[in-house]
Image (tube, rainbow, N blue to C red):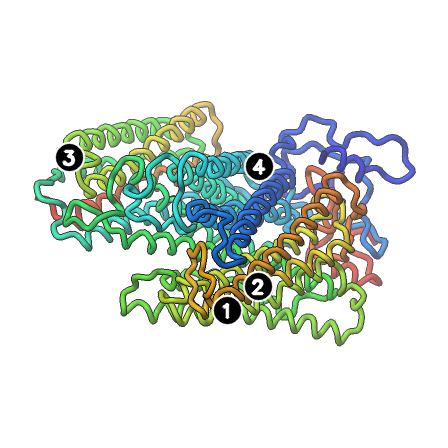
Amino acid sequence: MTDTEVEEAARPEGSGPSQPVLDLPDPWPKGSDHKYIGSLYVAAAVVFLVAGVAMALLMRAQLATPEAEILGERTYRQLFTLHGVFSVFLFLLPVWLGLASAIVPLQVGAARMAFPRLHAMSFWLFLTGGIMVCIAPALSDVFHGWALNDPIPVRLGLPGQGPDFLLLGLVLVLMAAVLVVINLIVTVLQLRPPGMTLRRIPVFSWSMMVSGAVLLFALPVLIGAFGLLFVDRHYGTSIFSGFTGSRGGNPLLWPRLFWFGAYPMLWALLIPALGAVSEIISTFTGRPLFNRARASAALVAVGVLSFAGWGSEVGTLNRGARPLFILGALAVLAPVALLVLNWLMTLRMAGGDGDGAGRMGSTPMLWALGMIPVLALGLAASVVSAVDAGRDAHANYWQTGQQHALFFGAATIGAVAAISYWGPKIWGRRLSDALGKLEILAVVGGTVLSVAGMLLLGIQDMLVHTATFDDGDEWALGNLVVSAGAAIIGLGLVVLVLDLLGSVVLRRGRAAGADPWGGQTLEWATTSPPPRHNFDALPEIRSATPLLDVRTAPSQPPEGTA
Amino acid sequence: MSMVAVSGTENLPAVASNQAPVVLPTGEPLPGPVPGRPRRGSSTIGTLLFVTADAMVLAAVVAVYLGIKEGATTWPPRGVSVSTYLPTMITITALMSGFSVQWGIFAARRNDGRNASIALILTLFLGLAVANLEWLTFVRTGFGFNDHTYGTLFDILTGYHLLHLLAAIVVVLVLAFRTMAGHFTEDRHDALRAGAVFWQYTNVVWFIVVTVLFLLSRHG
């Protein structure tokens, strides 16, 4: 498919029949092309997203009315676990790794990934792991909760091969993610063209470097944790079970180990969303990001501080450690808020200019703007979560609301914004603008609605794992609101998937052209989709926004052409 | 055509004379890039990042070990006593292999293929000796994987090192053949350096394992 696209894009108008662009033997075949592998990651992630949302809708149908009997308690528990695992490990992680694989080399002006074959291998590793996770619940019941923290001790309550498959599948997924991250970092460090200094890297690539650095330290901890849990289950050892003097292990270790890895990982999956939205806002306001240096520093600060708050998710904290984790969980919010201020300043200055106003209504920009209220809601909820570290707000629906606002809401809406912004570059077709507005309304509105309901249920202390509730409970209203919001999100996602299928897969969308948005960074200096080797030639790079430089100084002919 | 000098294109064929020229919105064609040399050393940087991630897996296991040790009444459990003789011999041998692999790199940097080959073969020999000693340690511990958590974690930690060592032996074996075939020169020995980084990392794993299992836990 990409081949024909390259041909189409490469055919000069009115010229004779086109020849294939790459008719010579190619040492880096299509199977290891970063745009192709990135697209595969994104496609797989979207499939898993649909599955994860379908599970959520089933659960919300069960909880929409009191004393419903749509799902049994047991089925509910399984869906509950799988929904979390799918959303985080099989959607959010691969969608960002996929987008970054496709975009980052283009943004920094590289012709390929640093290790193309490793990149290809990582995808098939990921897919194998994902399929194993899908098979797991068919074999036997899996854990309860995506933190896999119930039942511990794991061996007693949970016989069968299902959990083992789940753990091994997740280990493969995480290994693939680590390999992609290494590949991306080396690509940025090593394959930049002259002039593209580290300070001039576009802000999305920068955010992926930060996110990659966090994942490089966080994901291996989860690999180790899942590996040890697998050993415990499969070989009957007792690392995470029983206090029997010197013979047994320590069940309190599991939540500590899990959240030490998972907490920074969640933030690392929000960081690229922040980067993508920064990029989109600066493109559609037609000016560089306000105080770019501070924005880049804020992203780094989010990455560093994301390691400080993991203890706030652990219920059995030492008294002495709790204040530190409260501070840590609060500290990470500050640079995110600072970044939001930077966006607002960029928007305000663009409003002062008066130009660019016509492009503020473009679909990617609307997605980016829609992300801001959801992010703000998530930040506000996080303040309460942080202050209540390790207590009720992490056992009841407040946690559900906070995590869904930040890591479903903001991170996912950011990812969709990125798909609508860079999708035309990678696939050569634009998504529908009319449907886009409907999707934004449904996804953003539904997210705000359901998160509000979740936070209400949190105040009413409905526990996270609740599978049904009584007729007389005060929870009825909140649950109805959450279910209604979820249904609206589901509707929006159905339209989005149909839009992607129609515009991109069936190629009904408008052809994108090299630079549909007036971009400022290098990926817009080549055809859409780009040829296998990305660029025939690059403009001179003298700042973080090389295309903006060329555009804003048209009177001076660029060096070398005069 | 000659202006296609984007880093990473060195392996690609010259392409696309039929490609539509990319034109900026202002109507000007894009100027060509300044030709530059691609940076060397990607494999070494990639390996450094890989061993960082790998060390975090080890850190997770070590954290679990220390957490369980903290909560245990007696540690290691009564009746468990592992001789420190073999681990000491392994440590000395591992240190020597660390020197020999660096010798290989210094030799390759001077275009001295003969010394480089000798150094790598010596490294392989020392690595196999470590693997053999480690296997002997396993056999002689006197407890099983499933007897108690100390046994489980002892085997996991030493096994983690042994797996890395076996992988490193395969890597250095390939590098030794490549050295003998004359693949590495003063300018081009990135793969050799990356392999050496991985070899040294397996030694670091051993030093961490021996510290955790022996220096921080009293045997005897």
The amino acid marked with disc number 2 is: Val
- Return the disc, 4 or 2, that comes first in the chain's sequence: 4
Tag 1–tag 3 contact (CB < 8 Å): no
Label 2: chain letter: A
Q: Which mark is residue A72?
A: none
- Is residue A168 shown left or right of residue A294? left
Query: Residue A34 lies in what quarter of the image?
Result: top right
Q: Which mark is residue A456?
A: 1
Q: Which mark is residue A116?
A: 4
Asked if both marks, 1 and 3, belong to the same chain, the answer given is no
Q: Rounded to the nearest whole Å, what is the CA distance between mark 4 and mark 1?
A: 48 Å
Residue carrying label 3: B143
Residue B106 appears in view: no
- Is residue A259 shown left or right of residue B155? right
What residue is drawn where x is 59% and y is 54%?
A205
Image spot of residue A159 (x, y percent)? 33, 37
Asked if both marks, 2 and 1, belong to the same chain, the answer given is yes
Residue carrying label 2: A481
Q: Is residue B34 above or below residue A378?
A: above
The amino acid marked with disc number 4 is: Pro
